[in-house]
Each structure stands twice: as structure tokens, then as C-alpha cells.
Image (cartoon, helix red, strand yellow):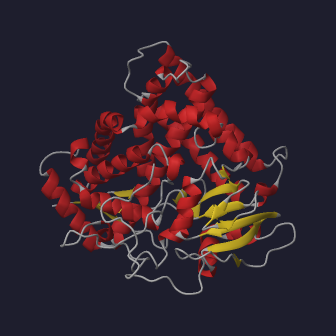
Amino acid sequence: MTVHAGPGVGARDEGQRAEPSGRGHVEGVTPAFAEGPRGLPLLGNLPAFGKDPLAFFELLRERGDFVRWRFGRGPALFIAHPDAIGELLTEVERTFDQPDLGIAFRTLLGNGTVVAKGADWRRKRSLVQPSVRPKQVRSYASTMAECAVALADRWTDGQHVDIKKEMAALTQLIAVRTIFGVDTAADAESIGRAMDVAQKEIGAEFSGIGALLPDWVPTPGRARIKRATAVIDAEVSRVVSRHRGGDTERPDLLSRLLTARDETGASLSDREIRDETVTLYIGGHETTSSTLVWAWYLLSQNPRVREALTAELDRVLADHEPGYDDYAELTYAQAVIKETLRLYPTIWLLTGIAKEGATLGGTPVPAGTRVWSSQWATHRDPRWYGDPEAFRPERWLPGEDGEPAERIPEYAWYPFGGGPRVCLGTRFALVEAVLVLAVLARRYDLDVTTGGIRPVPSLTLQPDRDVLATVRARK
């Protein structure tokens, strides 16, 4: 399956923005692998990567489309060109393998579809995918909107809120209702607090010295992840037990996983159920929460975009709250979310390990090389986006002549990955983000009062501080 960014996405117009000379891959030309910054003995470029991964990947992008560097003692290759990124994502399972992302990552996610490989991954994907198809997402849409309406009803004109906390609480509630089928604040809060701890520690481990330590080495961060995971495991086990002893026709994701059967008639084990529900929770809560926070931040800084959004909401929704059938009509709201995901992609890097026979752009990649790509760096490449630092949702919409406003290459926008391992929850996340944004922006403007917010790359891309705002009721 290929990720398409929606309206306005197509093949790159070679005459619109020519590729600068001296860079790596141009179609039909064998790429030259450039050398990255000089690293340190044993550590390689890990200190620079750990200090600021986003800036490090932008630095590599400026050096070329194919740049060698060292992740510790191991060989690494950074790729920036959409063609190469497409090769990496579509060749996973054939010439590129899923890497081991470390003990911290495995402690939280277990061996779910994000981590599993080969036949095990194919089996799990076939069992999980039906629960997030468009028909099922439609059934979850009403819950998404209802939870957002309840939050809107609690807000008042002039109220000061922390958007980060508000969006986290909202998407946690949506997640526990749609995934676990439960409806108490305790369920949402206990799982949510544990997830916050786990994702923070995973980011610290992945970009620090912990990335080079063997699994058996104890660290304070690893101990915190284990404690947080124990809380998550206990909550999931309790909810699974409740489901097994109750109504098997419930509409939530967990019930669908419990009744799923593979081609041999076998079901998912309790451990597999746990791994998949945690994976879906992160996809349905963490990614959407972060996307909405960045969307409010960008809208507050761009009154013109905010006015265009509210004009569409007034026109499409009139006097009713949004539902699944409105999603297709809310094209500008979709563009706002897509542009937010371009500038602040929740998943900010992808990586794979080259197998024997792996190539990129026709050039052999030595087996064992870890190949890296960064949504953050590629999404801000001026070759693919005019004025790449600007928040401009119109780039995703057709122009007056019906042609795309900007011709953006495939895999120049890939916040959910792509290829056979594209995120299963893509549709769920996009519908949730658009409906929540529509419910709240229809009633309120949020004026962000916190300046200088920086993105922090952990398991997902998060703001580095509370995002404070004043709620302004629309007249």
C-alpha cells in the first residue's frame, strides 16, 4: 500500500523545482554516497545525533541525498530523496529488515505489528487490519465527535487552558472508548500517565548512550519504563478479562481483536492482544494528541489560515456537529492537518537494516548497514516545498484550474510511513484529528500565549513545554 497525501499530490514536476547540482540521486543517475561529519571513536556521530536529532538530520540532508555516518560503531546511511525513501519503505521484508530498536522500545510494544517480522508480521497484520478499515473507522467517528463536544461544552470564553494537557486527556478518552470499550476517567488517566513516562524514556534511551548499551545493563530510565509498562499490562489484562466474560459483539477495537481468526482458525494470544492494543493506543492517542497541539499552535500564529478554516466549518457544518460523512467535505480542515503533519510529523524518523543484495538508486548497500530517513528533514526540503518553513495548507488543495497547487513527489510526505508496513491506524488518526479540530474550531479560537515552543523528539514529536492558550468564543 502506498501513502498518498491527498489532493494536490502527484509526481514531481521536473521543470518546477530543479534539483541542485552536486547532490546525490537524480532519476537515471547512480547516486554518490557523501560522507557525514567526522565522528568519535566507538561513539561515532551518536553525541551529535543525541544532542539534537532533528538538526543533525537536516545537516545530513544538506550534505546530500545519500550520506554515510556512524551510529556508534555501526555503519549508517542517511537518505533524503523521496525516490530512495520509497525504495526503503516498499522493499521492507525483501531487501531491508526491521531493526531492533532497543530494549526500551520492545518493553513497551512487545512484538506487535510495528516490531514483528516475516510470517509473524504478515499474520498479525491480517488479523489487526480489519478492525481499522474505513467501515470500522466510521463506527468510531461518533465517539470521537461526542468526546470533543463534551470538551467544548466545558470550555468558556476567556478561559486559560493548557492545550497539551487538554488534547492529551481528550485523545486518551477517545482511545479508551474506541479501543478498550471502557468509559471511566481512571482508565484513561492510569494508562495515559504510564504512556507518558514510557514514551519520554524511550526517546531518551534511543538518542543517548543507552542506545549502545546491552539489554542486560540496568539504568534508571529502563527501570522507569518497566514500572510504566507494568501499569499498562495490568490495565490491559483487566479490560481483556472483562471482555472475555462479557458481550462479544461490542463495537470496540479490542472486541474485534478478540474474535479475529487467521487462515488456520487460530486467534491472537493474550500476549499478542496486549501488544496490539498498546500499539493501537499509541497510534490513536499519542500521534493525534501531538498533531492537534501543533495544529492549534500553528493556527494561532496564522490568523489568515484560521479564518479560512472557520469559513469552511461554517459553510459545511452550518448548525450541526461534524460526523464521518462530513469528513470528505472538510477539505481545508484536512489540509490543515496534513500541513501540520508536514511541519511537525509525529513520527519523525524511520530506519531499516540492509540485507544481502540491498540497493538504493541502483547502488549496492552493504549488508548490515542501518539506513535512516527523517520525515522532519524531508518534509522541510525546499526542493519539494515552496517556502518550506511556512504553514500553508493551500499547498495540498487544487488550484483554480483544478491542478495541484504544488506538485509534491510521492514519499516527500510520509508521516505514517509507507509501503507494506504503512501505519494501520492512518485513517483512524486522520479522521480523529479532523473531527476534533472541526468540533472545537467551530466554537472557539485558541490564542496561544506560550512562545518559543520547540519540538522534542521522543517516541513521538512533542512540544518541549506546556502549551498555554486563551479560549476565545467565536461570535
Residue that lies at the very extreme toward the bottom in this rendered image: 21
Above or below residue 335? Residue 428 is above
81 to the left or right of 96? left
The spot of residue 178 in percent (x, y) is 40, 33
377 to the left or right of 175? right
Q: Quadrant of the C terminus?
A: bottom left
Snapshot quadrant of residue 402: bottom left
Above or below residue 455? Residue 460 is above
Residue that lies at the very extreme toward the right in this rendered image: 41
- Identify which residue, 316 or 112, lies in the foreground: 112
Above or below residue 114? Residue 241 is above
Residue sitting at x 71%, y 64%: 365
The spot of residue 364 in percent (x, y) is 70, 65
194 to the left or right of 332? right
Numbered circles on residues, count: 0
- Identify which residue, 245 or 98, lies in the foreground: 98
Residue sitting at x 43%, y 50%: 288
Snapshot quadrant of residue 306: bottom left
Residue sitting at x 58%, y 24%: 237
Whether residue 390 is visible, yes or no, is: yes
- Identify which residue, 130 or 155, lies in the foreground: 130
- Identify which residue, 336 or 404, lies in the foreground: 404
The spot of residue 392 in percent (x, y) is 33, 72
Residue that lies at the very extreme toward the top in this rendered image: 245
Whether residue 454 is visible, yes or no, is: no
The spot of residue 361 in percent (x, y) is 60, 68
